[in-house]
Amino acid sequence: MSLKPSDQLTLDLSHRVATGREDFLVSGANEAAVAAVDAWPDWPSPVLILVGSPGSGKSHLCDVWRTISAAALVTAGQLKKDNVPDLMKSGAAIVEDAPGSSLDEVALFHLINMAREVSGHVLITSSAFPSSWRLTLPDLISRLKAAQVASLGEPDDDLLRGLLVKLFTDRQLQVDEASISYMVTRMERSFEAARTLVARIDGRALVERAEISRNFIARIMQDVSEPGLFEGD
């Protein structure tokens, strides 16, 4: 039995993602967080915590800051007390995806303390505000209460439009303004939905060898059956 083009297996081909400072899209939804990172090294606290949903740009901002600060980078699950001195060799460290499933609270406490001692800085990313991390170490809780917190909100129209253009550009795809406007007015307003939609459009276009037009995008969006991804036509 032959498969229809939509039934054929497609590969999620790698694509270059632009992560320079000039590539970061700024709007009212994230300008405070961008300004907080850009203020380095004159941060009001040794610790800056970036809070935002998946795909909101936390890792992108980390890449920007890492380039200018030479910061070491670990995930929350990789952070251990023994590697704290190495992480602070440059005076800057990034801890991504806190608190994770197995945060070593003592290690994070020591990392923050060492940053204070050497006039260094720690950038932490999370999808939730630290008050909801369910920490048990009082000293760490106290340190995090003194940290600067900046949030990246869900995209407004301008940011969503720019994000879609960037996602297509990262995949070396050109999409006209009418198609972008069609998507913006009909899709769920979230970073994750935008990434999922662009990946789906790219994949189907490859399978069907189709031009990415407004009509093609409309058909892909109408075919989506996952509840909550799009608001509908």
Image (cartoon, helix red, strand yellow):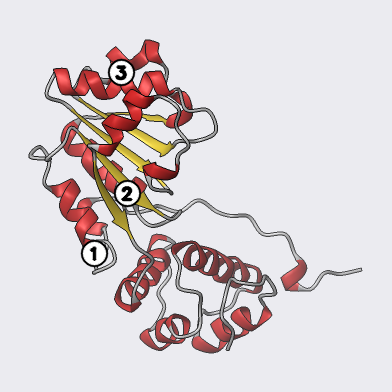
Q: Pointer 3: residues within 10 angstroms few (<14), some, or many (20+)?
A: some
Rendered view: 186 above or below 132: below
Q: Which residue is mark 1?
A: 26
Q: Tell me: 88 left or right of 73.
A: left
Q: Residue at x 17, y 49 (%)?
A: 36
Q: Which residue is mark 3?
A: 110
Residue 142 placed where, x, y %? 29, 31
Mark linked to residue 46 = none
The furthest residue to the right: 1
Instruction: Please name whichever residue, 132 or 210, is drawn nearer the observer in this view of the structure.
Output: 132
- Reading the chain from its start, which is encountered first: label 1 or label 2? 1
**Residue 60's disc number:** 2
Query: Of 11 and 83, which appears nearest the observer?
Result: 83
In the picture, residue 232 is in which quadrant? bottom right
Q: Position of residue 33 (x, y in %)?
A: 23, 54
Which one is nearer the viewer's eye here, 169 or 61? 61
Amino acid at circle 3: His
Distance between the alpha carbons at the discs numbered 3 and 1 = 34 Å
Q: Secondary structure at mark 1?
A: loop
Disc 3 from disc 2: Cα separation: 26 Å
Kind of residue indicated by mark 1? Val
The amino acid on which the numbered mark 2 sits, given as a three-letter code, is His
